[in-house]
Image (cartoon, helix red, strand yellow):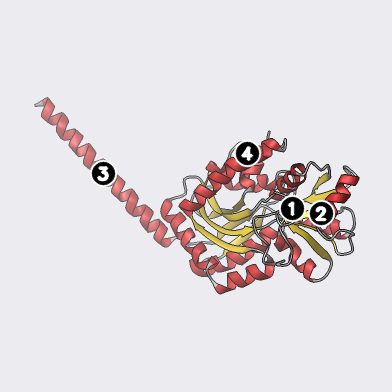
């Protein structure tokens, strides 16, 4: 009699657990179906006017149209992106706070600026691929990477090369490129907005930057691009050869995408991914990319996660080789 009673209680408990699980699943589905019911924050890791900010605002506009709610771009710059990552990592995993992430999620971690890595976030989608370039003032005496390298070899440590901050992708790219050529230069970290102004003011000799921050100044004749430090030519500067084409074996493509705090409901992630796909695949987004210097490169959440993990392993090795891994 006691055995039957115990078995019956277990059966009832199982039914209750199953019912609760079903109710939770239905509630989650209903939440995702209604999502979003208020504006969504998109945290950008660099200042207004930076390459990341330019692309994020174009994306936010397209996603807002898909989601029926504003996507509010909020700039939280500093420490190569670490400040913004820390902020988002600490937010509620409900889909209402996203980060416009990039390879920097790995560089800030291996630089010792965060105590968490990319696994603290759930990937939503890759958005773009950007190709870092080396640029100088239009009246500088160098016209290609060979010219610049010859000067740097003749005057070790004299060439001052600006980047977007310690641990940023442009910093790692600059250090990696010159180290690969066994050339000593002076790397100067700035905020992404200040670095270009410092070049224009003649305070530094060159910058390693992403196309979005440079394209208007190149078109205006204020700057010139000496080389593309990536796997292919930059469409914004189609006549500028890559480092490999100029005889230097180096490439450092940069991706950008969206991520949310770990544990964000999968239906919410799927809703955001759907909005990204629709926004990135519009003719308007492609046209903005051609104008501002980025290439649409949509990747869904699962594939994007694979890309992030693979890139993390590569960056760990590259930063260790460059002496930047803490």
Q: Mark 4 or 3, which is nearer the eye?
A: 4
Give the quarter of the figure containing the C terminus: top right
Total numbered labels: 4
219 over 247 or under it: above or below: below
Quick check: marks 3 and 2 in contact, CB under 8 Å?
A: no
Callouts 2 and 4 close, C-beta under 8 Å: no
**The N terminus - image quarter:** top left
Question: How would you rate the neighbour count of disc 2 (Cα within 10 Å): few for under 14, some for 14-19, many for 20 or more?
Answer: some
Give the Cα distance between marks 1 and 2: 8 Å
Please state if 262 lies on the left or on the right of 236 as rendered: left
The residue indicated by pointer 2 is: 146
Which circle's residue, 2 or 4, is located before the other in the chain? 2
Q: Is mark 4 on a helix, strand or loop?
A: helix
- Say if mark 1 contacts mark 2, CB within 8 Å: yes
Q: Is residue 284 above or below residue 117?
A: below
Q: Position of residue 140 (x, y in %)?
A: 89, 60
Marker disc for residue 247? 1
Quadrant housing residue 324: top right
Q: Earlier in the sequence, mark 1 or mark 4?
A: 1
Real-space Cα separation, disc 3 to disc 2, in angstroms: 68 Å
Disc number for residue 316: 4
Q: Residues within 10 Å of mark 3 (few under 14, many from 20)?
A: few
Q: Which badge, 1 or 2, is on the more N-terminal residue?
A: 2
Q: In 3D space, how far apart are the residues under numbered discs 4 and 3 (Cα atoms)? A: 44 Å
Q: Mark 3 points at which residue?
A: 18
Query: Mark 3 or mark 4, which is nearer the start of the sequence?
Result: 3
Residue drawn at point x = 84 percent, y = 53 percent? 148
Q: Is mark 1 on a helix, strand or loop?
A: loop
Residue at the image point whose x is 46% and y is 62% from the top = 274
Q: Looking at the image, is mark 2 or mark 4 nearer the viewer?
A: 2
């Amino acid at each position: 009699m006691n055995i039957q009673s115990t078995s019956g209680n277990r059966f009832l408990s199982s039914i209750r657990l199953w019912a609760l699980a079903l109710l939770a699943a239905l509630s989650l589905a209903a939440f995702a179906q209604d999502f979003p019911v208020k504006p969504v924050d998109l945290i950008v890791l660099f200042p207004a006017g930076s390459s990341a900010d330019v692309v994020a605002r174009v994306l936010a506009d397209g996603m807002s149209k898909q989601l029926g709610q504003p996507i509010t771009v909020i700039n939280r710059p500093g420490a190569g992106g670490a400040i913004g990552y820390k902020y988002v990592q600490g937010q509620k995993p409900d889909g209402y706070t996203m980060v416009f992430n990039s390879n920097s999620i790995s560089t800030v971690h291996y630089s010792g600026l965060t105590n968490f890595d990319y696994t603290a976030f759930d990937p939503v989608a890759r958005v773009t691929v950007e190709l870092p370039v080396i640029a100088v003032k239009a009246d500088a005496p160098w016209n290609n990477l060979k010219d610049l390298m010859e000067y740097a070899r003749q005057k070790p440590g004299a060439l001052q090369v600006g980047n977007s901050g310690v641990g940023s992708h442009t910093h790692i790219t600059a250090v990696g490129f010159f180290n690969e050529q066994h050339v000593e230069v002076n790397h100067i970290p700035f905020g992404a907005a200040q670095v270009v102004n410092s070049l224009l003011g003649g305070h530094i000799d060159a910058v390693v930057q992403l196309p979005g921050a440079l394209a208007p100044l190149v078109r205006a004749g204020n700057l010139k691009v000496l080389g593309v430090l990536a796997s292919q030519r930059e469409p914004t500067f189609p006549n500028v050869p890559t480092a490999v084409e100029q005889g230097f074996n180096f490439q450092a493509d940069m991706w950008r995408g969206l991520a949310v705090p770990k544990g964000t409901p999968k239906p919410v992630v799927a809703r955001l991914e759907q909005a990204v796909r629709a926004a990135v695949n519009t003719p308007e987004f492609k046209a903005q990319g051609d104008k501002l210097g980025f290439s649409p490169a949509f990747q869904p959440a699962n594939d994007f996660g694979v890309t992030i993990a693979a890139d993390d392993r590569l960056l760990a090795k590259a930063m260790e080789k460059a002496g930047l891994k803490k």
